[in-house]
Amino acid sequence: MQAGRSTRFDQVRAQAQMESTAAILPQLQADIAALMHRIATLSGLPAGHMNAQLELVQDLPRQLPAVDLDTPAEVLRRRPDVRAAERELAARTAAIGAAQAQWFPRLELSALVGSVAADPGDLFTGASASRRAGLSIHWPLLDFGRVSALVDSADADARAALARYRQTVLIALEETETELVRYQQSQHRTAALERSANAAATAAQLARTRYGQGYIDFFEVLAAEQELIEIQGARVQSRTEQTLAMVNLYRAMAGPPGGFTPVSALPYNRPRG
């Protein structure tokens, strides 16, 4: 085989790879249309009425803004389940008296150990690392002993309300920590795939150069480019999962806290038809 030339077999094989890749697009476009219709329906609008808005090029968030650890209590208190349990307990313990109302349990949380990230990009790095493995932000368990003594002197309904309140708060803390872990790991995976995609792109370029010089056959070029396509697809999927992990964390916190500061965003271009 002469340098820079290919056989008919190589050409047909390259065309097959191109068509195989192109065949993925119609399904992706159908999925996008279905999701846009679903969003419109969930918004109380007929299918297709939000297409113009949803088709606009948007920025895909790349990092979760840093959490202001001075206000996590107010963040979790916005959860409907926590608010409902808190109000139920307040109603059940109303008979304790106004003088003792100051001892009503409040959702007061703080970091266990570690320091607050000075820069949003350092949220999950050494600058804000905790001694406890897995998370850089932790919530300690609430101390309910103070109010328990008061509730013990009240009726059974008040004691039951306290138990429900405590369980609701612990579940809220569990869900928040779980989603923080998932987001952290999605960051690690996306970063690894970014490095992998860069290396695969370099390998594909080297393969094309070596083929042009006559050192390898076209099959090796196809293999390198196929690997690049697969890694790029995995990278896009990982970015999507990272964004969904952020959404799930916001859901656990009942929305982003007011202390969040926007950070860099990754441009995302939706495939065109």
Image (spheres, rainbow, N blue to C red):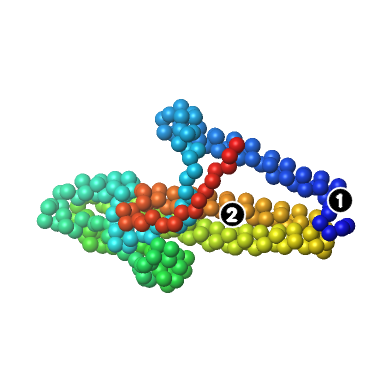
**Between marks 1 and 2 in the image, the one whose residue lies nearer the viewer:** 1
Nearest the viewer among 263 and 108 is 263
In the image, what residue occupies the spot 41% across and 71% down?
127
Q: Secondary structure at mark 1?
A: loop
SS type, badge 2: helix
Image: 215 above or below 265: below
Residue type, mark 2 in image? Arg
Q: Residue at x 54, y 46 (%)?
A: 269
Q: Where's residue 225, x and y in %?
A: 71, 54
Q: Which residue is mark 2?
A: 235
Mark 1 and mark 2 lie on one chain; the one further toward the N terminus is 1
Residue 195: image location, x then y, percent: 60, 63
Left or right: 163, with 60 as reference point: left
Mark seen at residue 181 = none
Please state which of residues 219 and 110 is positioned toward the viewer in this rendering.
219
Which residue occupies 57% across, 50% down?
237
- Residue that mark 1 sits on: 7
Q: Amino acid at mark 1?
A: Thr
Q: Residue furthest right?
A: 1
Let me know if residue 47 appears in the view: yes
Task: Classify 10 Å Cα crowding around label 2: few (below 14), some (14-19), many (20 and above).
Answer: many
6 to the left or right of 231: right
Give the quadrant of the C terminus: top right
Q: Callout 1: 10 Å neighbours few (<14), some, many (20+)? A: few
Residue at x 52% of width, y 37% of height: 35
Q: Quadrant of residue 153?
A: bottom left
Is 143 situated left or right of 265 in this image?
A: left
Q: CA distance from mark 1 to mark 2?
A: 33 Å
Picture layout, residue 113 above or below residue 247: below
